[in-house]
Image: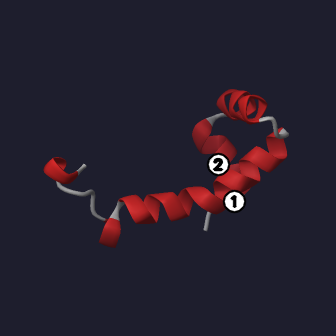
Amino acid sequence: MISGIEVGQAIGVEKLKKLAEASGIDFNNARDLLAEYLPIAIDKATPEGKLPPKDKA
């Protein structure tokens, strides 16, 4: 699990602010949603912790 604060540190506050603004949500909500869903997206993109072969990417 990753915290909203860790997401902010990894992505950067300015990029998060731009993402939140473009999405029409406030900064804290954007940060928390990324903390919730980013690990799920990464898990689905890297089954068993491995990147898919280049021909399937």
The image shows residue 46 at horizontal and vertical percentages of 35, 62
Q: Along the line of sight, which residue is nearer the eye, 15 or 54? A: 54
Task: Name the residue located 31 percent from the left edge and 72 percent from the top edge.
Answer: 48
Numbered label attached to residue 3: 1
Question: What residue type is disc 2 on?
Answer: Val
| Few, some or many residues within 10 Å of mark 1 (<14, 14–19, 20+) | some
- Seen at 65% across and 42% down, the residue is 9
Give above or below for 25 relative to 2.
above
Say which of 17 and 10 sits in front: 17
Horizontal side of 28 relative to 1 (left or right) equals right
Dot 1 amino acid type: Ser
Where residue 8 sits: x, y (%)? Answer: 68, 43
The quarter of the rendered structure image containing the N terminus is bottom right
Total of numbered circles in the picture?
2
Find numbered disc 1 in the image and state the secondary structure of the residue it sits on.
loop
What's the distance in space between the residues labelled 2 and 1, CA to CA? Answer: 6 Å
In this rendering, the answer to whether 56 lies above or below 21 is below
What x and y, as percent, mark residue 54? 17, 48
Q: Which residue is mark 2?
A: 7
Mark 2 lies on a secondary structure that is: helix
